[in-house]
Image (cartoon, helix red, strand yellow):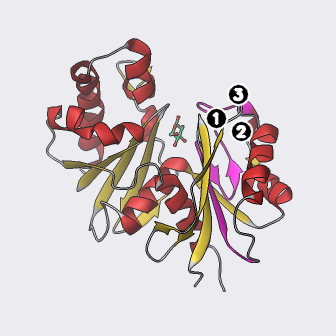
Amino acid sequence: MAKKAIGIDIGGTGIKGALVDVRTGTLLSERLRYATPEGGSPKEIAAVLRDLNSHLPKAAGLPVGICFPAVVKDGVTKSAANVSKEWIDLDADRLFEKELKRTVHVLNDADAAGLAEAKYGAAKNTKGLVVVVTLGTGIGTALIYNGKLIPNAELGHLEIDGVDYESKAAYLAKEREGLSWDQWAQRLQKYFGKLEAYLTPDLFIVGGGVSKEHEQFLPLLKLKTRIVPATNRNSAGILGAAYWAKKHTTD
Ligand code: BGC
């Protein structure tokens, strides 16, 4: 089994990458960060990846995992909630492989964050159902059952009060509407309350940049399920993507 892999995390504002020790979940290189091109078209993002890749270790056969904010089925991006619509039904594995000239494995960004928590973080050795929720530009969700990922859960788009609730409860909504922690927590209460009613999880993990301020909002939520912040914050996508690539590579 490969011990090292490259993880790349494509987000709405930044594209980050590093070399990862996949046994321990630690970064073995500096974390490189580039701004995501305005509009986020496939061609422009692929060009940024080529640049980023040229600054990462070149060892032949090093697995490369890339996470992206969309449903990803067999390397094909199938949705585009907060990114260019050009990604819908695009063979992202092939696009990036052409650009980077190496084999890659693309997966959903919240799934990568979920894997990072399951393998190296707050869900390590947790039995039962763990629901990882990332609060950022959108709401990403990952379902982990007995340590295994059930890919492409898109529970950020639950319809509540007649709207796609991502538009109300994502961190972007708090920023956009200037909500206080208390006001935002009321929306999160509604959202997590629904998830709890539908799934009866054993643990909720909250990720995304805002999770470093978890003390401001997690204590305001009244749920039956334990809810904790993610332990892998800025690097969650990188770690999960690297782990995913390793898992799909035999050596
Ligand atoms: C997308 C998900 C993604 C999440 C977080 C949502 O809008 O539909 O695929 O995981 O945002 O980026």
Question: Mark 1: few, some, or many residues within 10 Å (few <14, many ≥20)?
Answer: some
Give yes or no for residue 109 being in the magenta stretch: no
Question: Within 10 Å of the Cα at label 3, are there few (<14), some (14-19), or many (20+) other Cα atoms?
Answer: few
Q: Name the residue under label 3.
A: 38
Amino acid at dot 2: Ile
Residue range in magenta is 61-85
- Near-viewer residue (130 or 45): 45
First in sequence: mark 2 vs mark 3? 3
Confirm if mark 2 falls within 8 A of ligand 1: no
Mark toward the viewer: 2 or 3? 3
Which residue bears the numbered disc 2? 88
Question: Vertically, is 176 above or below 93?
Answer: above
* Image spot of residue 211 (x, y percent): 33, 41
Instruction: Tell me the element at label 1.
Output: loop
Which of these two is toward me, 95 or 155? 95
Q: Distance between the residues labelled 3 and 1?
A: 15 Å
Q: How far is disc 2 from disc 3 in space, using C-alphas? A: 18 Å
In contact (CB < 8 Å): disc 2 and disc 1: yes
**Secondary structure under the numbered disc 3 in the rendered image:** loop
In the orientation shown, which residue stands out farthest toward the front?
30
Kind of residue at disc 3: Glu
Give x and y (percent) for residue 247. 57, 74
Residue 37 location, quadrant: top right
Instruction: Note whether ligand 1 is within 8 Å of mark 1.
Output: no
Relative to 92, say whether 194 is above or below.
above
Residue drawn at x 71%, y 51% as measured from the top left:
76
Task: Rate crowding at label 2 as few (under 14), some (14 to 19) or many (20 or more) other CA atoms within 10 Å.
Answer: some
Mark number for residue 80?
Answer: 1
Q: Which of marks 2 and 1 is nearer the N terminus?
A: 1
Q: Is the magenta stretch mostly helix, strand or loop?
A: loop
The residue type indicated by label 1 comes to Ala
At 77% from the left edge and 58% from the top edge, which residue is drawn?
54
